[in-house]
Image: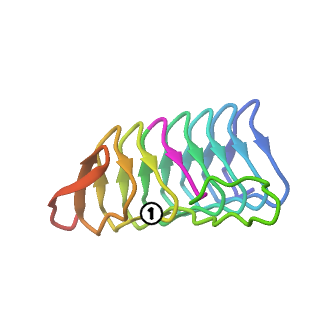
Amino acid sequence: IGRGAVIRARSIVYAGVCIGENSTVGHGTLLRSYVAIGRESQLAHGITVERKTQIGNYVRCSPLSHITSEVVMEDRVFLGAGIVTINDKGMIWKQENVKPELLPPYFEFGAKVGSGCIIAAGVRIGREALLGSGSLVTMSIPPLAVAYGVPAKVVRFQESL
């Protein structure tokens, strides 16, 4: 745990977790094995972060979200409240002689995801892209795109911040 990092009450931190300097983990947040969190990041209350997820610097994750295994969030990503990420393409779990295809979502630098979005397996959210609240994201979103809807569709592009 880095200097100045704060972990609030009732949070559960598994072995191998690394929390960067001045990062905060909210009440009742679960960090599974080998999660890495950069510096100056904030994970609010009631978040589940599954194993081997990588969270960059200056990342903000709002309350009550589920971050599936091996997700990557580059620096300055913002996730609104109640985000759900999915990594199982076929929704297969412990079926005999069947290996699930696990493809975690990936969030590039500065991506912003509105509250209540669902991000499907293998989806890549581009650099500084913006997803509207409540969107169901089933396909990758290009850099600087503004997208929303069920399913999410690109409606325009913005200039780089």
The x and y percentages for residue 115 are 39, 38
Three-letter residue code for mark 1: Val
Residue nearest the observer in this picture, 28 or 140: 140
Residue pictured at 35% horizontal, 43% vertical: 114
- Return the residue at label 1: 123
Q: What element carries label 1?
A: loop
Q: How many marks?
A: 1
72 on left or right of 25: left
The quadrant where residue 27 appears = top right
In the shown orientation, is residue 153 left or right of residue 51?
left
Residue lying at the far right of the rendered structure: 15
Start and end of the magenta stretch?
Answer: 81-88
From the viewer's perspective, is 88 left or right of 60? right
Q: Quadrant of the N terminus?
A: bottom right
In the image, taking residue 38 as reference, residue 157 lies left or right, namely: left
- 10 Å neighbourhood of mark 1: few (<14), some, or many (≥20)? many
Place residue 87 in its image quadrant.
bottom right
Q: Main secondary structure of the magenta part?
A: loop
86 part of magenta stretch: yes
Q: Give the residue drawn at x 76%, y 62%.
A: 34
Q: Residue at x 16, y 63 (%)?
A: 157
| Looking at the image, residue 37 lies above or below residue 42 | below
Coordinates of residue 31 in the picture (x, y in percent): 72, 48
- Where is residue 38? Give x, y as percent: 59, 62
x%, y% of residue 54?
Answer: 61, 64
- Identify which residue is drawn at 32% across, 63% down: 141
Magenta-colored stretch includes residue 85: yes
Colour scheme of the rendered structure: rainbow
Q: Is 10 in front, or is 84?
A: 84
Q: Residue furthest front?
A: 97
Q: In which quarter of the image is the C terminus?
A: bottom left
